[in-house]
């Protein structure tokens, strides 16, 4: 059961909508398997809770604004290829994946990425699937309340990572999938996903 305090911060920002009733992790049996230790996606961390609250408000606004009237396998392919193009031009050593429901419909690993990045994607995806928000928003929410996801979420950190880079795909307010990037500092992973999704939304409108 989700801890009672888990979404106090998000509710403070007026978030509503349908959240998953229970965790439905990607990866099946891998949830019960230990993955080898991986280096954290390190970057400077904001220490001021007011800064984290402001960042959370921005992240939740992104989720409200980046939605679609439809999102098909063809859309996933288009977004995935755009992410590959952006990352290749910038020489980013990333792994990219898109899920629709339980199906992985796009996956690419660029030079310099490794299987560790695939593991990071799985862990970030589980966070989005369980909490219904971007992996960066989840981690930011915990920090905005002076908490730490790894120690306070009561979830297995070998299976869940509230690091930036995985973002929900929503169609008319309903979450239908996730798109993710791993290989850069977490806020850069997140920013790359946002750039590609905004471009796709604007082309479709």
Image (cartoon, rainbow, N blue to C red):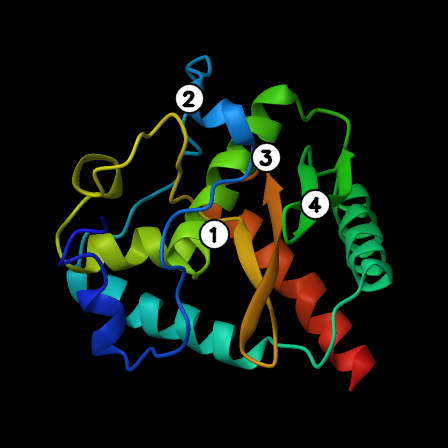
How many other residues sit within 10 Å of disc 2, few (<14), some (14-19) or many (≥20)? few
Mark 2 and mark 1 residues within 8 Å of each other at the beta carbon: no
Residues at marks 1 and 3, CA–CA distance in whole angstroms: 20 Å
Residue at the disc numbered 3: 183
- In the rendered structure, the answer to whether residue 137 lies left or right of residue 134 reads left
- Mark whose residue sits in front, 1 or 3: 1
Q: Which mark is residue 129?
A: 1
Comes first in the chain, label 1 or label 3: 1
Secondary structure under badge 4? strand
Question: Which quadrant of the view contains residue 8?
Answer: bottom left
List x then y, in percent, for residue 175: 55, 66
Q: Check disc 1 and report its element: helix, strand or loop.
A: helix
141 sits to left or right of 181 = left
| Circle nearer the N terminus (4, 3) | 4
Q: Which mark is residue 103?
A: 4
Relative to 95, residue 158 above or below: above
Q: Position of residue 185 (x, y in %)?
A: 49, 41
The local secondary structure at tag 2 comes to helix
Q: Quadrant of residue 192?
A: bottom right
First in sequence: mark 4 vs mark 1: 4
Relative to residue 25, is residue 202 drawn left or right? right
* Nearer to me, 195 or 162: 162
Q: Are marks 4 and 1 in contact (CB under 8 Å)?
A: no
Label pair 1/3, CB-CB below 8 angstroms: no
Residue 83 place in picture, x, y as percent? 75, 52
**Residue at x 12% of width, y 53% of height:** 146
Label 4 close to label 2 by CB (< 8 Å): no
Q: Earlier in the sequence, mark 4 or mark 2?
A: 2
Badge 3 crowding class, 10 Å Cα cut-off, few under 14, some 14 to 19, many 20 or more, is many
Q: Which residue is mark 2?
A: 32
């Amino acid at each position: 059961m989700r801890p009672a305090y888990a979404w106090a911060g998000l509710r403070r920002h007026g978030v509503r909508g349908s959240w998953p009733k229970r965790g439905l992790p990607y990866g099946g049996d891998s949830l019960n398997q230990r993955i080898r230790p991986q280096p954290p996606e390190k970057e400077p961390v904001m220490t001021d809770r007011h800064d984290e609250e402001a960042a959370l408000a921005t992240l939740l606004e992104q989720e409200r604004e980046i939605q679609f009237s439809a999102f098909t396998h063809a859309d996933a392919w288009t977004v995935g290829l755009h992410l590959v193009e952006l990352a290749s031009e910038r020489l980013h050593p990333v792994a990219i994946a898109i899920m629709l429901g339980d199906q992985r419909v796009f996956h690419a690993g660029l030079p310099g990425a490794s299987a560790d990045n695939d593991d990071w994607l799985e862990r970030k995806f589980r966070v989005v699937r369980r909490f219904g928000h971007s992996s960066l928003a989840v981690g930011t929410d915990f920090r905005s309340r002076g908490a730490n996801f790894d120690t306070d979420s009561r979830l297995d950190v070998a299976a869940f990572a509230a690091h930036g880079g995985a973002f929900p795909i929503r169609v008319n307010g309903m979450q239908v999938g996730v798109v993710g990037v791993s290989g850069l500092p977490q806020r850069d992973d997140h920013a790359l996903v946002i750039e590609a999704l905004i471009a796709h939304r604007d082309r479709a409108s």
